[in-house]
Image (cartoon, rainbow, N blue to C red):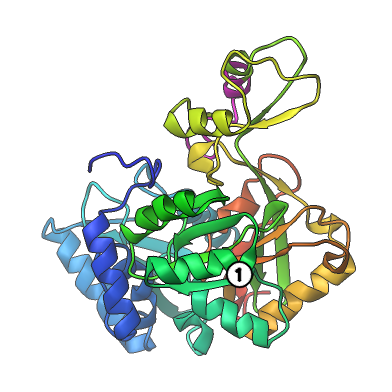
């Protein structure tokens, strides 16, 4: 696939993504191709015990015929999220098998066996008897914001736009820095920040339109993205997602600081990735009036990429034990509003230790029905939180 600067290090086929987006929007019971097919497969899997066992039998036979393969442990094709799920299953005495549709890829179906029961799933296990309405819409940023406003949950001002004219109207209404992004999606694909002019909005709108018919145009919230994962509406784990950045020492250039930062063995390209020197880095430095030869003062934090993703050098810090009670209560309210067993929430706030009521321009950025729970299992700093344990205990309540 041709590299796309706006997709970043996790590119998707633009045309197929746009087609699947339209299919999903007009008929939520029909799954689009590529990414949405795999994400929504969860609804079709695990209908009942008999079906799950039949699916396991079929996949076993296919593997014996050389059509895909069945594994009993994590291998190099699997994601970090799969590693977290598997480690928790082993710790709790759950037998897990993974059928790969293609021998060279990690996509496929999982089969969990515990206490005589069998459950099939894709990506993340979910309780068989828990079907929430929000699973259908929480990934849609436009619908999510409308429902959250009704529930009294803070979100950014703005709206979903089809035409550039609508986007310009939102820009005039917000009267401040705005963000332009696809109404569905993750990893910051085709998202533009720091839009302060109509000309910049025009460019950003065209970038977002490459992936979708509907574009979210909203005010830019202030602070740092925190990933809040809510299991069973109550169990909560929170990591701060620090942007790709270097910290000045008053002596080294930004390029030298990048080299020093990338020397950290934790940035092994699997859990966490090195900082990238690319077009986005140069654009971000230009926006700040800097170059790779600039020498930041002691302690100064310099952001070198506007994408908040581990693929671009983002790091995480567990802050669960330091969250202000008001914020924790808000997160519980979000969990109860969604009433879904597994929810990932990106929440923007400057200081998580202070009440959200005292901080301006804060709120929910997006929600995810298939969150990357490994963020909590393997934080860059802070205490690991094995939230997959809580998920498995929802799936198999008999686990002590």
Q: Nearer the viewer, residue 167 or 296?
A: 167
Residue 174 appears anywhere in the view: yes
Quadrant, the C terminus: bottom right
Q: Is 216 placed above or below 375 here?
A: below
Left or right of 382: which side holds 254?
left
Q: Which of 305 and 333 is in front in this view?
A: 305
- Residue 236 lies, in percent from the top left, at 72, 67
- Residue 3 lies, in percent from the top left, at 29, 39
Q: Is 48 placed above or below 1 here?
A: below
* Residue 266 magenta: yes
Residue to which mark 1 is pinned:
173
Which stretch appears magenta?
Answer: 258-273
- Residue 33 lies, in percent from the top left, at 24, 68
Q: What element carries label 1?
A: helix
Q: Which of 295 and 172 is in front in this view?
A: 172
Outermost residue toward the top in this view: 251
């Amino acid at each position: 696939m041709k590299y796309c600067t706006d997709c970043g290090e996790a590119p998707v086929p633009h045309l197929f993504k746009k087609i699947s987006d339209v299919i999903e929007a007009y008929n939520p019971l029909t799954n689009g191709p590529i990414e949405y097919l795999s994400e929504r497969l969860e609804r079709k899997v695990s209908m009942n015990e008999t079906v799950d066992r039949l699916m396991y039998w079929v996949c076993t036979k296919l593997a014996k015929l050389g059509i895909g393969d069945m594994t009993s442990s994590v291998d190099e094709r699997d994601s970090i999220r799969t590693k977290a799920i598997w480690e928790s299953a082993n710790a709790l005495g759950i037998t897990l098998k993974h059928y790969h549709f293609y021998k060279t890829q990690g996509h496929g179906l999982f089969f969990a066996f515990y206490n005589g029961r069998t459950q099939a799933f894709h990506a993340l296990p979910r309780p068989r008897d828990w079907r929430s309405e929000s699973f259908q819409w929480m990934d849609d940023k436009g619908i999510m914001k409308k429902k959250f406003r009704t529930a009294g949950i803070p979100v950014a001002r703005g709206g979903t736009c089809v035409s550039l004219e609508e986007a310009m109207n939102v820009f005039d209404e917000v009267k401040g820095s705005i963000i332009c992004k696809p109404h569905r999606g993750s990893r910051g694909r085709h998202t533009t920040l720091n839009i302060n002019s109509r000309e910049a909005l025009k460019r950003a709108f065209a970038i977002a339109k490459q992936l979708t018919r509907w574009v979210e145009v909203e005010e830019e919230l202030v602070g740092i993205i925190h990933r809040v994962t809510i299991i069973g509406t109550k169990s909560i784990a929170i990591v701060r997602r620090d942007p790709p950045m270097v910290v000045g020492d008053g002596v080294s250039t930004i390029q030298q600081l990048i080299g020093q930062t990338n020397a950290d063995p934790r940035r092994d390209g699997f859990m966490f990735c090195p900082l990238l020197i690319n077009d986005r880095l140069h654009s971000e430095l230009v926006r700040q009036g800097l170059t790779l030869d600039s020498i930041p003062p002691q302690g100064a934090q310099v952001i070198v990429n506007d994408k908040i993703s581990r693929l671009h050098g983002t790091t995480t810090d567990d802050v669960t034990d330091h969250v202000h009670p008001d914020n924790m209560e808000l997160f519980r309210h979000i969990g109860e509003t969604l009433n879904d067993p597994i929810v990932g929430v990106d929440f923007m706030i400057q200081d998580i230790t202070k009440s959200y009521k005292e901080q301006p321009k804060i709120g929910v950025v997006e929600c995810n029905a298939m969150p990357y729970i490994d963020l909590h299992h393997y934080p860059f700093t802070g205490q690991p939180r094995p939230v997959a344990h809580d998920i498995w205990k929802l799936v198999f309540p008999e686990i002590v």
